Image (tube, rainbow, N blue to C red):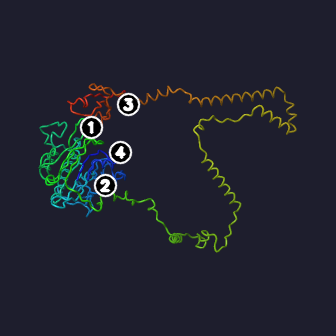
Amino acid sequence: MKIVTWNINGIRTFKNGIKKTLDSFDADIICVQETKVTRDLLDEKTAIVDGYNSYFSFSRGRSGYSGVATYCKDTATPFLAEEGLTGLLANQGEAVGCYGDQVELSSEELLALDNEGRAVITQHHFIGTDGPQKLTVINVYCPRADPEKPERKQYKLQFYQLLQCRAEAILSSGSHVIVLGDVNTSHRPIDHCDPNDVDNFEDNPGRKWLDHFLFGKAEKAQNGNTDDEFEEVCMKSASGGARQTNYGTRIDYIFADCCLVESAFIGVDIMPEVEGSDHCPVWAQLSCTLQSSTKCPPLCTRHLPEFTGRQQKLSRFFVKVSEKDRASKDSEESLPGSQDDGEIRENLNPVVQGNSVAKKRPTCREKDINANKAKRSKQMKTESNAKGSLLAFFKPKQTPSIPSSENLSLEQTESSQDSPGSESDTRSCPGNVQTESLSVVTEMETEYQDEVEGESTSIDQPKDCKKGPCTGFWKAVLRGPPQPPLCKSHNEPCVLRTVKKAGPNLGRQFFVCARPQGHSSNPQARCNFFAWVDKGK
């Protein structure tokens, strides 16, 4: 049997294919932490993986926060599975049980401890040296104590207390126990990359609890070399890329009871070659062989309605009404003066016993109304089908058309031929008057053509305009990020960072060395270059 724990720092770590990643571990049980996914965002490809059955715990208060999941091979299907440590989220008859003494915590505190999706428990059966035995795996993602939030420190200690209470209760029931995951506390100074106060390092409340938990009911080992202790190996970087310089803290653990360590554990180690997260996976090999359950527990994602095809559809909100019910409803709701049953049947089925019902001849008024409706619908259809063009908004303004000289002379000729008195009227007019009127019309037409040509030229002008002024304007408005300087130690371009911590510098940008963080004695690690970004740039 092989078991793996890994803080994946977001479900997007499996972007290259979750099945491919799970298969690469070649493990029977794979526990992941910090999935950062809620139930409404969980997709089927992540929830249901071919060859595996999965069990998730989601954060119910915040989206994209916390969350753990346990993937078991189909050959290692658990017999029981439960979400949380308190038992408040478990269904009766389907839980692992054994909750221990929780009287020191109120019901509100217990509910809050399970509200962030930090624990999944699976119970397995295996064949050991003493025959069939039970193994309970507790996959946890312990809270982090924010120094600026004292309530989170208390929350973390309460979670530790609840975890120990539950693990000891299950152990007392006769089952072996494995507690694994991100504990968010480094145990010894050697487990921390940069301990600030070495003299008072063990006075931290989290480390005091870890000492009590390990040496009270469970066993711990360093490097897997001792007989009466168990592995604590982990790797977490202080920032992205620090795994390259092996600069981090050990906070990912695998704990087990003393009897199981002595009888079944073969080897333990980390997997630094697996990338995708700022944590390294931790694995443990056991000599026992797991037995698979014939069916998955109810907590399995295969039983979720959204993945079984039983989710509610829109059609379920509409009830199908039979013809009998519809007719009875119409008869009950009929108003005085409405149609009787015979008229309703006649309207629904106009042909009765082979005799056609005579159609009523429309009156003249009805014809006019129908014609107006048809005309209006045709007009609306024509307007709706008309597709506008952007150039239509820039066309020259329409002006009254002025007849040309040829049309004017032609119209005058036609009018002189049609009207008997027009010939005498035209002959009586002086010749210079006709010439002046024609010249005025010609001048007006020439001016109108010039105006149209000027407007069309102004419309076409943007196409040929120079791009220099526009480009300069946008460059002045959108300057883009400042050019990175070169760090003094490596002479390499720096990276731009932004202050996210609350304070007077919140939101300010600065440049630091682009290399991964490491010890000050390591020349390949990040140097101490730092420079603020000027606000004017």
Task: Answer with mark 1 or mark 4, whichever residue precedes in sequence.
Answer: 4
Of the two numbered discs 1 and 4 in the rendering, the one whose residue sits closer to the viewer: 4
Closer-to-camera residue (336/85): 85
Residue 100 makes an appearance in the image:
no
As shown in the figure, which amino acid type bears the numbered disc 2? Tyr
Left or right of 79, for residue 264:
left
Q: Name the residue under label 4.
A: 16
Left or right of 337, for residue 54:
left
What is the C-alpha distance between the residues marked 2 and 3? 46 Å
Query: Which mark, residue 481?
Result: 3
Residue 110: x and y in percent read 23, 55
Of the two numbered discs 1 and 3 in the rendering, the one whose residue sits closer to the viewer: 1
What is the C-alpha distance between the residues marked 1 and 4? 23 Å
Task: Answer with mark 1 or mark 3, whichever residue precedes in sequence.
Answer: 1
Left or right of 426, for residue 124:
left
What is the C-alpha distance between the residues marked 1 and 3? 22 Å
Task: Answer with mark 2 or mark 3, whichever residue precedes in sequence.
Answer: 2
Q: In this view, does 374 lie above or below 534?
A: below
Task: Answer with mark 4 or mark 3, whichever residue precedes in sequence.
Answer: 4
SS under mark 1: loop
Q: Name the residue under label 2.
A: 52
Of the two numbered discs 1 and 2 in the rendering, the one whose residue sits closer to the viewer: 2
